[in-house]
Image: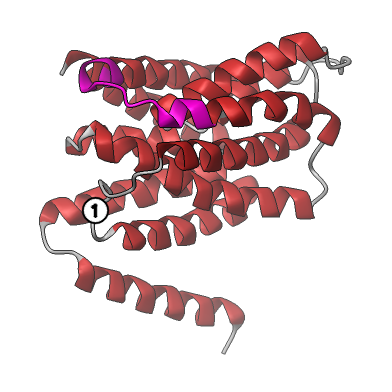
Amino acid sequence: MTDSRYICQNITKFFDFVSLQMETLQDYLLLAGLAVAAFLYASVGHGGASGYLAVMAFAGLAPATMKPAALALNVVVAGIGTWKYLRAGAFDWKVFWPFAVVSIPLAYVGGSLHIPPGVFKPLVGVALLFAAWRMVLSSRQTEVARRELRLIPAFIAGAAMGLLSGMTGVGGGIFLSPLILMLGWAGTRETSGIAALFILVNSLAGLAGHGDLSALPANFPIWMAVVAVLGWLGAELGSRRFRLPVIRNLLAVVLALAGTKMILT
């Protein structure tokens, strides 16, 4: 039996098991949305938090569930991405650490803030609309000449991204990647590796700051397992077979619709 057939058979068994854990049509649709988000985001080098938030916004989940769920799922997919890029040598510690050293404590602070739904929903909505805009621009972005990293702007940006990450559940990669590329602080491959680890550490810090995970649904371990499988597949296949600009534009439409829904409802 070939390795590909063995892998396919085991994935089929896994999803057969998952289907037994679902009770309603909404459970299936929500899980399918999270799986698609993990797959597509991993294929373009992101953890997927904005996608998970979009799916949960469409499903009408409470803010108390959305933030810790997005952060925890982000940890799973960003962890896979971090392993992949570090193993490939696509990383630059000199660019990563100035952002991380200030973002991690502020992500913890942001995670500990209990934001009223009336504030949380429009805040996430704006973050999703920004992410949609960045997705469209990134599909057309080209690399610029490399420049030396400037510490003070990196500290300021890292602090803002860390706080926003913890407050909303967005990992921060959607903000960090375009900034690094626009200013020429790293190449495309290195930026993906930097963003993956940045998302991972900030999601962990935000989750630690949030503390209370009692709002997570009972089948959340199933969410994590499915996201892990689809995130791994997306990370493996995305860079070789998919037309990334098309995927980014598709994600932008979904994010824009979800962001608008969060602001208006």
Q: Residue 126: image x %, image y %? A: 37, 14
- Give the answer, above or below, for where 115 lies relative to 58: above
Q: Residue 163: image x %, image y %? A: 52, 22
At a point 48% along the width and 42% down the height, the residue shown is: 208
**Tag 1 secondary structure:** loop
Q: In which quadrant will I find the N terminus?
A: bottom right
At a point 44% along the width and 31% down the height, the residue shown is: 111
Q: Residue 127: image x %, image y %? A: 41, 19
Q: Residue 82: image x %, image y %? A: 67, 48
The residue that label 1 is drawn on is: 217
Taking the image as shown, residue 22 lies to the left or right of residue 10, namely: left
Q: Residue furthest left?
A: 24
Magenta range is 108-121
- Give the answer, above or below, for where 175 lies relative to 194: above
Q: Determine if the magenta segment contains residue 186.
A: no
- Give the answer, above or below, for where 39 lies relative to 132: below
Residue 204 sits in which quadrant? top right
Residue 162 sits in which quadrant? top right
